[in-house]
Image: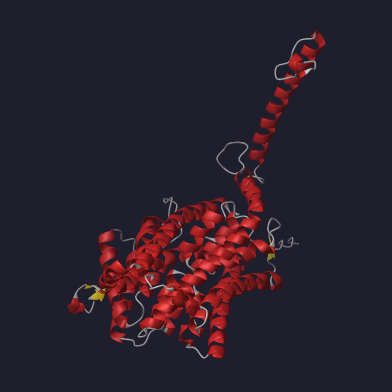
Amino acid sequence: MTAPRPPRKAFGGLSLPERNYVADALRTETVGGLLLLCAAVAALIWANVPALQGSYQSVSHHRLGPAALGLDLSVAHWAADGLLAVFFFVAGIELKRELVAGDLRDPRAAALPVVAALCGMAAPALVYTLTNLVGGGALSGWAVPTATDIAFALAVLAVIGTSLPSALRAFLLTLAVVDDLFAILIIAVFFTARIDFAALGGAAVGLAVFWLLLRRGVRGWYVYVPLALVIWALMYKSGVHATVAGVAMGLMLRCTTRDDETRSPGEHVEHLLRPLSAGLAVPLFALFSAGVVVSGQALGEVFTKPETLGVVLGLVVGKTVGVFGGTWLTARFTRASLSDDLAWPDVFAVAALAGVGFTVSLLIGELAFDGDPVLTDEVKAAVLTGSLVAVVCATVLLKARNARYRKMDEDERRDEDLDGVPDVYEQDDPAYHLRMAEMHDRKAAEHRRLARTTAAARHTGGEVTGGAGEENDGPA
């Protein structure tokens, strides 16, 4: 009779390859998040200093590109539709890797971040909708507070949660990737005013060619980059947001390794493009999207207008309640249970951090209130305010738990046999226990030698190195 499978632990320990992947992703996204923060601050300064305001508007609205193809777009438009396609391309590769090689390949493990992400999008949308129904505001911005910013959230996590267990870090990373996928689906479905079916069909043909070339093992950036640009242009002309093309191409890349490979093509491309995405594409988008005019009156109106108040409450309250509630419901009504090393306040702190909704929230805000520049800027200010409040709340909660995290982090990193693999991953390896036994035998032999030396010195009345001397009024 087959032994019953033990209950699955939510936020349990990661495999070593998965932990290394998460660590590498965190390092890049941390730098990208800090650059994103610097870009946002630069945008606010540029847009609010009287002597610089004119130049910011001039640069943002400067148009460039081939007019014959209908691609003479403003700089801000290129940042939102062009550069963010790179960001979503990397997000698509991350999601594909999680689905075929990461934790999401196990449907039981995938349930937790997927349910948490869905609840973390539904709750903010509900909070925004209720706020605007009561206050008589516009319901078109319901999707603004639904997205979590990967780079910003992970950068904050790296700074204030230095000892956070790797499983919780991986949960936030996976949740944000799933969150971004659903956000781009929302953009494609709800914010597409018109569809040019000829252009959309051309984009679909381009994607099919892209997929066939990948399956036939064709290599060379000079093949894929021009094709990707054509697919992007056709997707843009179709009326569907062009970033959808990035996600679609990312999902097509193979993310499993073969016998002669140390890294899959998807991981290789992601490794090359992640610095470009986190270090250039997203910060430039923030530079030309976060430049809203801020004043005391404008900040006060953030908490009085139903549209802006709904965004702030959605990010701060809705995200926290949705992510935490989805996680708790999954643990309550499935076989998943919380890891013995964690407590629910730990999950609540990470759920609060999910309220950092910067990049995609700004993008959706532009789409939701297109044609109303005043309300668009007010909603952007609300996104910045809500994200800042979420960061402050998460900082307080994570700092309160950091001592506990530090000990867990030390346990995860301990490598007593100095073989380069943390001991926690070798508990089922007999060779590890043999090495540890030999080490303990050597240490025991050294202690026995020291004990004999000490006993002999005391018997002869001599001094013992490291013991008490006459200056300490005690015998050696």
Residue 348, relative to residue 200: is it above or below?
above
Vertical arrangement, residue 100 with respect to residue 469, above or below: below
Residue at 45 percent across and 69 percent down: it is 358
Percent x, y for residue 106? 58, 65
Can residue 8 be seen in the rendering of this structure? no
The answer to whether residue 170 shows anywhere in this view is yes
Place residue 350 in its image quadrant: bottom right
Q: Quadrant of the N terminus?
A: bottom right
Which one is in front, 48 or 108? 48
Colour scheme of the picture: secondary structure
Count of marks placed on residues: 0
Q: Nearer the viewer, residue 278 or 46?
A: 46
Residue at 36% x, 87% y: name it.
Answer: 193
Image check: 312 left or right of 454? left
Residue sitting at the far top = 460
Q: Quadrant of residue 442?
A: top right
Q: Which of 456 and 196 lies nearest the eye of the viewer?
A: 456
Query: Which quadrant of the figure has residue 472?
Result: top right
Nearest to the observer: residue 142 or residue 23? 142
* Residue 61 x/y as whole percent: 27, 74
For the view shown, which residue lies furthest in the right direction? Answer: 459
Residue 79 percent coordinates (x, y): 32, 69
Q: Position of residue 290 (x, y in %)?
A: 39, 70
> Is 468 positioned to the left or the right of 109 in the image?
right
Q: Residue at x 76, y 17 (%)?
A: 454
Q: Is residue 331 above or below residue 135?
A: above
Q: Quadrant of the C terminus?
A: top right
